[in-house]
Image (tube, helix red, strand yellow):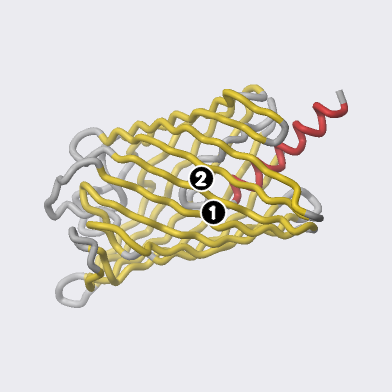
Amino acid sequence: MISKRVTRATLNSMAVLCLGMLPQVVLGAAWTRPQGDLLFLMPVSYTTADEAFDEDGNRVDRRKFEMVEFSPLIEYGFTDSLTGGFQPKYRQVSVETADGGTVSNSGLAEADVYMRKRLWSRDQAAFAVQGLVKVPINPDEGHQAALGRDQVDAEIKLLYGNRHQAGSGRIFYNGEVGFRKRFEGPDDEISINGFIGWAPGGSMSYILRSANTFGLGNEDGNSEVLTAGPSFTRHDVQLMASYRMRNAMSIVGGVSTTYAGENVGVGNTAFVAMTLPF
């Protein structure tokens, strides 16, 4: 009984850590929350881009793009193996115009709703499946400074995570592969993401994450939204650090950059987030 409680507490702390590390794409890792546990995550990010990767993957200049996003997450453990989440996304977007001016827009663009089911676990390892629906709220897709695309997305992901002791610290990692159906026009996507982290002991943890999106078509046109065309490829790398306080709250900060892609902006992002587990 004691061993089960310890394992449950460990998986709970890992879920909080992994969620806190992903403020832009907060969809969790393979771990689920214990039954009745509640997590609030409050991330704020700033993204800017004045370059882009064209259809051949070459880096070219583009008009300056800026975005501030606040995307609070509420996640709840319905059972020990079933976790649900809700994440609305408020955005403020500014885009440079051809005459050197700026067009701005802001509002509640969309919301993600998801469920994650743990299919298997052993010691600190977990394998899970997650289903997500993105619901547009007020994306203003036709605006020059669009906040998002005005269509529903549905996504399915398979996730695997594990952790190991390494001296006085621990190494933890997660990998995932997903398919996203983008209705009403834009091409469907495949995502392959992963991270590896190091907690040397004490209150600090560090994580390196790779996020990769591949469009499954060749739809072109000028309907760019948030620097991305209807079909795009994007490769991001993120470096993050987390500080855990005595009251179980965590502060997370980091940076991200797009280092390769096609039909997408070269986004550089800084972010900070606070986790509040209950």
Residue identifier under label 1? 43
The structure residue drawn at horizontal position 35% and vertical position 66%, both measured from the top left corner, is: 66
Dot 1: element: strand
> Hey, which residue is sitting farthest front in the picture?
167
Number of labelled discs? 2
CB-based contact (under 8 Å), mark 2 and mark 1: yes
The structure residue drawn at horizontal position 25% and vertical position 69%, both measured from the top left corner, is: 59
Q: In this view, does 255 lie to the left or right of 99?
A: right
Q: Distance between the residues labelled 2 and 1?
A: 9 Å
Of badges 2 and 1, the one in the foreground is: 2
Q: In this view, does 268 lie to the left or right of 100?
A: right
Observer-nearest of 136 and 56: 56
Looking at the rendered structure, which numbered label has been put on residue 26? Answer: 2
Observer-nearest of 4 and 35: 4
Q: Quadrant of the N terminus?
A: top right
Q: What residue type is labelled 2?
A: Val
Observer-nearest of 42 and 114: 114
Dot 2: element: loop
Q: Where is residue 131 in the image (x, y as percent from the top left)?
A: 44, 29
